[in-house]
Image (cartoon, grey):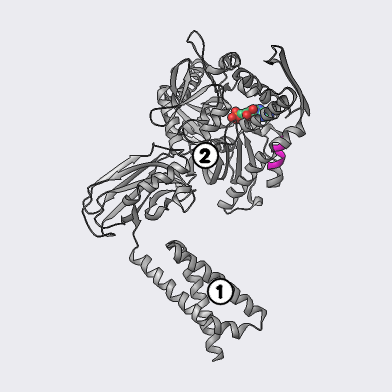
Amino acid sequence: MERVIGIDLGTTNSCVAVVENGAPVVIPNRGGYKTTPSMVAITEAGKKLVGHIAKRQAITNAENTVFAAKRLIGRKFSSPQVKNAIATSAYKIVEGPHGDVRIMLRGKSFSCPEIGAMILQEMKLIAEDYLGGKVEKAVITVPAYFNDNQRQATKDAGSIAGLDVIRIINEPTAAALAYGFGKDMEKTIAVYDLGGGTFDISILEIGAHGVFRVVSTNGDTFLGGEDFDARVIDWLVDGFKSEHGIDLRQDRMALQRLKDAAEKAKCELSSTRETEINLPFIISSGRNEALHLQRVISRETLESLCQDLIDRTIDICQQTLEDAQLGKEDIEDVVLVGGMTRMPRIQEAVSGFLGREANRGVHPDEVVALGAAIQGHALLDNKTEMVLLDVTPHTLGILTHGGTFRGLIPQNTTVPTSRGEIFTTSRDDQTAVKILVMQGEHEKGDQNELLGEFVLTGLRKAPKGQVEIEVTFEINADGIVSVSAKDLETGKEQQIQVTASSGLTQQELKQMIDAAKDEMLDRRTSEDEEAAKQEAQRLIAEIERLFPQVEQIVVSSDFGRDATEKARGILQKAKAAMQRGDVQEIKDQIEALGRTARMFRGVVQKTS
Ligand code: AMP
């Protein structure tokens, strides 16, 4: 059977695994380490360095050493996240020709997929060394919360590295696969994954015969160990400034040393209560004398500097449970993934929130790569009984006339999937429609993220609402989205695989929406929807008409007052749904309206 490797392409470290004799194993690199720093550097002599060797020279070659490039992959240069990275990186981040991100190393510009490819290539070589032969196929993991552009860019990185990426899977899902591997169990588990750059939480059901179903997933692609390091750096820089009046941030080399020292101290504080940060000759004073930085940091200080970051992860956990419609008590095990979960305060926060100790049987740095290897093996070997049902982390849809977002594929829908809906033109004689493909949970389009856009032209001239366009979304097993729009009369079709402009600022997005407003689509109201609206309107009118009478009759009893209060709530909800034109919600409210109307009629009849 052909070999397939599983690669966890991490923000800080990467790891590669393979299934051997039916069991997944992590492949050590030449130095014997099971993980390899996700770092790339170019030396003065133009030599490319990857991994530990790049990390070792990072301080003396800070401007030409790239770390945490995963935070930039698939993002637009103008996005706030990239701005943030520019402020905290010693290497130079510049704008590429398509508004994308490029990294300058020794005067040459590299795209993020190219940087990712160098790391992937290294992982491929590590595997080939170990296996003694060529490896071509790989499964690569990404954070569950990665959007489409980020997934596509990761896949591109794989291709540049000469790998056939047979599947992209979500990191927490991979962790669950490794956790459940070889155990026949039925359980609901949570995977809490806090790595160097990203946070992910997923809730999964492991069923009989190797069925892994993701119930809900959530996360933050800009919350991770680097943010903890940044807090320590701020603390050191501020302390140094008040003591010496010098801002260490101006010196790139000093910044790189601070970064290293901050991370080291943070890691040490997971096992000790106090540690010393000692950076001799960190900078020279205006009077040409060398200054040193020496400070003791305690675990309590670190915790108080970072408590809000930890709280943010717990808020996201809460939201994910709600999305899964589960209570904390339904979670039967918690798997911790990512280097940051070694921090005791984080372990306490997670077990405090879920009311149970986390599972200690999995290795937080290796479990994701192991899961990727298991998935790769299962894809090539049809004897393996394993079904992976992952979900889409965001609602996907298009922007309609008036700036309203219409979701076609709801958050947490099992993928692969495809959904279509019919829209109509929004003005008379509209000959083109612009499809803005978005993801997000807000009703207002400008609050969501734009994934891409395309235009369908050559529509026949007709009064508004008469030309029908079917918009179809498809998500494949890698979580990559394609969208098509079809003129139902002429059959004319346009399609894109969504790869364009992520990470626009809100301002840019607003301008874009404004510029496209003449080419937007309207939602088509079907007869069934029209009927629902009319039915709701009729019931609302009836209830409102009977309300004063009913209120007078029942006011003397607690029970009656409760009932009218409830009815008021139902009315309010239904009216709000009518105002928004939210047909699904209107349909949901019709039953409650019907019940209320029947009750009101009953009260009035009995007393008349
Ligand atoms: P990962 O992306 O999973 O490799 O996680 C890397 C992150 O975990 C980095 O921010 C590391 O600084 C952090 N990390 C690694 N070991 C520890 C530790 N013992 N205590 C706290 N954080 C750690």
Residue that lies at the very extreme toward the top in this rendered image: 45
In the structure shown, which secondary structural element does the residue marked by tag 2 occupy? loop
Mark 2, Cα crowd under 10 Å, few <14 / some 14-19 / many 20+, is: many
Residue nearer the viewer, 427 or 260: 427
In the structure shown, which secondary structural element does the residue marked by tag 1 occupy? helix
Q: Which residue is mark 1?
A: 567
- In the displayed structure, would residue 549 be above or below residue 39? below
Q: Nearer the viewer, mark 2 or mark 1?
A: 1
Residue at figure coordinates x 52%, y 88% from the top left: 605
Q: Which residue is mark 2?
A: 144
Quadrant of image for the N terminus: top left
Residue at figure coordinates x 58%, y 46% from the top left: 186
Image-quadrant location for residue 345: top right
Quarter of the picture for ligand 1? top right
Distance from disc 2 to disc 1, alpha carbons, whole Å, reads 41 Å
Residue nearer the viewer, 432 or 214: 432
* Magenta stretch: includes residue 150: no
Q: Which residues are magenta?
A: 344-350
Q: Is residue 511 left or right of residue 484?
A: right
Residue at figure coordinates x 31%, y 42% from the top left: 495
| Residue 600 coordinates in the image, percent (x, y) | 53, 81
Image-quadrant location for residue 358: top right
Q: Amino acid at mark 2?
A: Ala
| Residue 364 coordinates in the image, percent (x, y) | 62, 31
